[in-house]
Amino acid sequence: MRILIVRNNSNSKAVDASLLLATYLATQGMDYALVDSSDLTCRCDHEGLNAALAAGVDMAVVLGGDGTILRTARQIGTSGVPILGINFGRLGFLANSSDEGVVAVVAAALAGDVV
C-alpha cells in the first residue's frame, strides 16, 4: 500500500503529525510519499505529486485545513484516489478532527472503519 501525505508546511503541528505518520507507516511496512501543500498553489506541473501518482497511490492523507484539502483535490483530479483530510487549520469543514491523533485516524481509515 502506498500513501500520499500532503502537509501544510507553514503549520508546525501538521509538520509534526506528518513525521509521526511517516514513522507509523514505515513501521507497518507501507510506502509513502510526502508533498508540501505550498507546491500545489497553482495548476503547474508538480514533480513530487505527479511521481507519487504515477507510482500508484492508494490514499492521500492531507494534513492542514480546508484550503490544503481543496488544493490537493484540484491536483489529484479524477484519479480516483480517496482523500482523508485531517484538520490542522482554523475551520475544518471538510476535514476530520485531529483530536484523536493522526495515527489513530489513518489506522481506522486503513482498516476500513472510516467512510
Image (cartoon, rainbow, N blue to C red):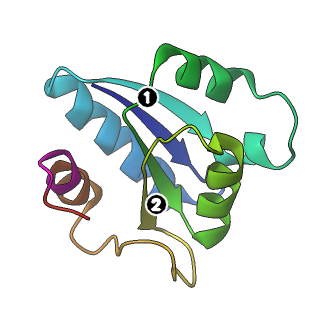
Q: Residues within 10 Å of mark 1 (few under 14, many from 20)?
A: many
Residue located 51% across and 32% down the image? 34
Looking at the rendered image, the quarter that the N terminus falls into is top left
**Residue 44 place in picture, x, y as percent:** 88, 35
Q: Earlier in the sequence, mark 2 or mark 1?
A: 2
Q: Nearer the viewer, residue 83 or 99?
A: 83
Query: Of the numbered discs in the image, which one, if any, rests on residue 13?
Result: 2
Query: Circle 2 — which element?
Result: helix
Q: Is residue 19 above or below residue 111?
A: above
Taking the image as shown, residue 52 lies to the left or right of residue 3, namely right
Magenta segment: 108-112
- How far apart in space, not on screen, are marks 2 and 1 (Cα)? 24 Å
Residue located 17% across and 49% down the image? 107
Q: Nearer the viewer, mark 2 or mark 1?
A: 1
Q: Nearer the viewer, residue 3 or 14?
A: 3
**Residue 54 place in picture, x, y as percent:** 57, 17
Q: Which residue is mark 1?
A: 57
Q: Nearer the viewer, residue 23 or 71?
A: 71
How many numbered marks, from 0 up?
2
Amino acid at the residue labelled 1: Val
For the stretch drawn in magenta, the main secondary structure is helix
Q: Nearer the viewer, residue 4 or 114?
A: 114
Query: Circle 1 — which element?
Result: loop
